[in-house]
Image (spheres, rainbow, N blue to C red):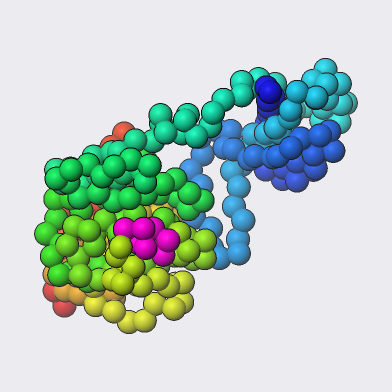
Amino acid sequence: MNWHQLIITAPKDSHEIISDFLLEQGALSITLQDAKDEPLYEPKPNEEKLWTTINIIGLFDDSVDQSSVAEKVRQVFQSLEFTWQDLADQQWERSWLENFKPMKFGDKLYVTPTCYDPVPNYVNLLLDPGLAFGTGTHPTTSLCLQWLDQADLKGRLVVDYGCGSGILGIAALLLGANQVHSVDNDEQAITATIDNATKNKVNDKIYTYLPEQLAEINAELLLANILAEPIIGLASLFAKIVKPKGQIVLSGILEEQADEVMKAYLAFFIFDDVVCDNEWVRLSGIRRAD
């Protein structure tokens, strides 16, 4: 069996009508992708955010009449660009394994898929790709994992704000932290964090919350791998969460956004040197004494 993708590039306001059209033509599924490499800031609860320009992708099987569907696209969506792509059938599990193998971060830490044996003599964080973002492959996550690998976390109380898959909080526990409070506005992320904590046998040391559920806390370390816009808006909250002389690690920030983020935090934190990975940066610092 071969598969075929019809990719239509369109403004975001058109995605519903185009998706419905593709389903009417026999598409088996619809995927939305960024068409212009545009950063997408984290949405508020119950808010849907989309890129300004989107690739709407319909997946078809071999029964599709590509010429007929293409002609209908031209008639209905005259000004839009579209293209067909053929996808050869393959063993998707084997393809996935070839692209996601144990990854090392720093000197001690590996993120290891559960289908592999743990790497001997290293700290292994067992994690498989899932619905919640965060496997360590993206520079923003990698930068945080590298920082954690080098930190003295023994006995620390940590907050992982915007926890996603739970990877940062779980890594902190495996590297010596005593307790992690994980926060996310997506219930799916909370579920993924609990599942991954159980998989790594640290579920008795991790607590999960929606943002409004987090009680007053004095953290020795706060981790936030979100994006610049929400990080800026959370500056005063993070200052309340982190105890004097406690540490903060911020990621999900583009290099050109670093100065603006630091400006929002300078009244509360003293920053270390900025660390870059491609276009992304990590900001870390110490809470000023009151």
| Residue 74 in view in this figure | no
Tell me: 91 left or right of 21.
Answer: left
Say if the magenta span includes residue 27: no
Number of marks drawn: 0
Quadrant containing the C terminus is bottom left
The answer to which of 195 and 274 lies nearer the viewer is 195
Tell me: 78 left or right of 103.
Answer: right
Predominant SS of the magenta segment: helix
| Quadrant in which residue 31 is drawn | top right
Q: Position of residue 117 (x, y in %)?
A: 29, 42
Residue visible at 40% across and 71% down in the picture = 208
Say if the magenta span includes residue 199: yes
The answer to which of 290 and 102 lies nearer the viewer is 102
Tell me: 17 left or right of 162.
Answer: right
The answer to which of 209 and 281 lies nearer the viewer is 209
Which range is magenta? 194-200
| Quadrant in which residue 261 is drawn | bottom left
Residue visible at 33% across and 50% down in the picture = 126
Question: Would you place residue 175 above or below residue 12 in this image?
Answer: below
| Quadrant in which residue 234 is drawn | bottom left
Residue visible at 46% across and 34% down in the picture = 96
Question: Would you place residue 260 above or below residue 204 in this image?
Answer: above
